[in-house]
Image (cartoon, helix red, strand yellow):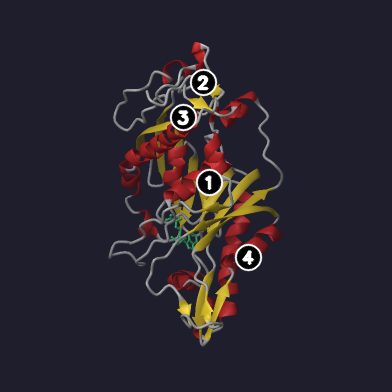
Amino acid sequence: MKTTHTHYIGSAVMMKKVADRSVGLVVTSPPYPMIDMWDEIFSRQDRKIEKALKRSDGILAFELMHQVLDRVWKEVFRVLSPGGFACINIGDATRTIGDNFALYPNHARILTATQALGFTALPCILWRKQTNAPNKFMGSGMLPAGAYVTLEHEYILILRKGGKREFTSPATKENRRQSALFWEERNQWFSDIWMDLKGTRQAMGKQKKRNRSGAFPFDLAYRLINMYSVKQDLVLDPFLGTGTTTLAAMTAGRNSAGYEIDPSLLENFYDKCKDSLGQFSSAIQHRIDLHNEFVQERLEAGKLIKHENAYYGFPVITRQEKELVFSLPVSVEQQDDERIVVNYDVPSRETATTVTATPQNTPAVSRPSGAKSKADGLLFPDFDPGS
Ligand SMILES: C[S@@+](CC[C@H](N)C(=O)[O-])C[C@H]1O[C@@H](n2cnc3c(N)ncnc32)[C@H](O)[C@@H]1O
């Protein structure tokens, strides 16, 4: 199996290189209106923004910044295939302009604009983005009625183009089954508050225009890709930044495309992808390890696990997880300045369950100790926690 990853330097307000209805999923985080680190990049795209900020007209600046983003959401709607999802990570902004401290509700403005374009809005996710800054509380301290709540969460807006996606042919159904999540991942990932995401290092080199990249955590993109697309889909990020969405798509066995207006962010991107091969297999290994821990705990609690995964032989809770299989990235090739190809190792049903000793970068898949294969006629009831 192979996947292809394309990155274009340019503005996503016109994504000419992305065909209509060709994208299965959009995962992105735009520059946040009214957060001052993005003022310059917005002002370069519409000079009226700079003027509004100079006149201290926060409401107008907010609206003009969103009008830049609206053009990108319109393109996102065009390129998504019917039933495709757009997951937009966005934080609201607080800012003092003149004497007035106010909230600028970015998530609400984007929801209104995208619904007007024809998107169906679905329940969104809040993720906790904790700040430990010593000056994080603003206002009158311990004296009532003059202090402001600190924003320590961001939104992941979840939008769909049209109705539910159809999987009709035997091949697409099989691919969907192979792209399944673990039951316990479903329980955690499809809850509306994520408390466990770690922020990501955003510092940039001295030669870069900004000192922070605004990158989101790898796990945020990787989860969303696993939740809302299937293997070999095309995942698009119109605000690609440092390429986190591409790295997550590579790990998940999806194709990807991205636009980024600042060329300095994607310098040496091929080297970064090549150097990330170890990170890709660690992410997969981590999922397998967590699953094995989950199984172990369940068996120790004396609960039965009915099903067995056809590729790895480990127990799984539901029938839907029986064909879940990881495509393991094994090499990365540069095709040209814009395109990178990833090659994968995909286990076959015959060989996969025997994989325990593994070459470098290959996740080790072992059964939880004490669990016996369903092929032996047992449903793991006789697990001995002491063994
Ligand atoms: C919040 S950052 C995205 C960070 C990215 N998720 C990551 O993990 O690195 C937003 C990015 O959008 C880029 N940008 C701003 N306006 C753009 C436009 N019109 N088209 C494409 N990229 C744009 C900025 O340069 C910035 O890198």
Residue 188 visible in image: yes
Q: Quadrant of residue 233?
A: top right
| Of the pair 385 and 268, the residue shown nearer to us | 385
Q: Earlier in the sequence, mark 4 or mark 1?
A: 4
| Of the pair 62 and 373, the residue shown nearer to us | 373
Q: Give the x, y percent position of residue 276.
A: 34, 43
Please give the name of the residue rendered at 65% of the width and 59% of the height, measured from the top-left corner. 114
Q: Secondary structure at mark 1?
A: helix
- The amino acid at mark 1 is Leu
- The amino acid at mark 3 is Glu
Q: Which residue is mark 2?
A: 381
Q: Earlier in the sequence, mark 3 or mark 1?
A: 1
* Quadrant occupied by the N terminus: top left
Q: Which residue is mark 1?
A: 224
In the rendered picture of this protein, how many numbered marks are placed on residues?
4
Please give the name of the residue rendered at 30% of the width and 26% of the height, measured from the top-left corner. 359
| Of the pair 267 and 118, the residue shown nearer to us | 118
Q: Give the x, y percent position of residue 131.
A: 42, 65
